Image (cartoon, rainbow, N blue to C red):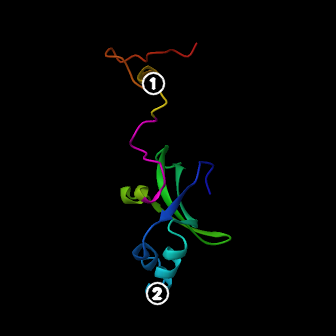
Amino acid sequence: MGCGKKYFLHLLSPEELKARGMSHRKAQLVIEAYPVLVLSNEWLEELFCPECGSSHWCHITQNDKHSHTVRWAPRELWEQVAHVDPLVPNPSVSQFTRRSARRASVSRSDGQRWFDPG
């Protein structure tokens, strides 16, 4: 699919497995055997849209070796990804670095860019 990092979905309850077509009994057994089940055929990935020229988070389901289903990733799916929240900034990046990185794309009050390509 894309070239971005894949964030695989983690399932914690039998209800999440039943929503994907598994029987109640089998879902119970799987969750008892694997308290955290990582799906290898479903993940979240940031993909570039050539139509609008920006990147979007997508929920990708691999149907078979050559077939995928791609849809916009709803916010609730991030709850099924371990240790990642796309709306919370990386705590290892300082405020100064974060502001400096955004400066290149933000215009000044007089309409000029902060940095001119030299």
Q: Nearer the viewer, residue 3 or 40?
A: 40
**Which residue is painted at 49% across and 54% down in the image?**
82
Q: Nearer the viewer, residue 1 or 86?
A: 86
Label 1 secondary element: loop
Furthest-right residue in view?
65
Rendering coords of residue 14 (x, y %):
43, 76
Q: In terms of sequence position, does the residue under pointer 2 or pointer 1 come before the other? A: 2
Q: Main secondary structure of the magenta part?
A: loop
- Asked whether residue 84 is drawn in magenta, I would say yes
Left or right: residue 53 compared with residue 64 = left
Rendering coords of residue 21 (x, y %):
47, 82
Label 2 secondary element: helix
Q: Identify which amino acid the numbered label 1 is placed on.
A: Ser
Q: Are marks 2 and 1 in contact (CB under 8 Å)?
A: no
Dot label at residue 94: 1
Q: Quadrant of the C terminus?
A: top right
Density class for disc 2 (Cα within 10 Å; few <14, some 14-19, many ≥20) is few
Q: Judge whether 58 appears above or below 62 on screen.
A: above
Left or right: residue 70 compared with residue 65 = left
Left or right: residue 18 compared with residue 45 = left
Furthest-left residue in view?
109
- Where does label 2 land, which residue? 25
Q: Which residues are magenta?
A: 80-90
Q: Judge whether 46 appears above or below 117 on screen.
A: below
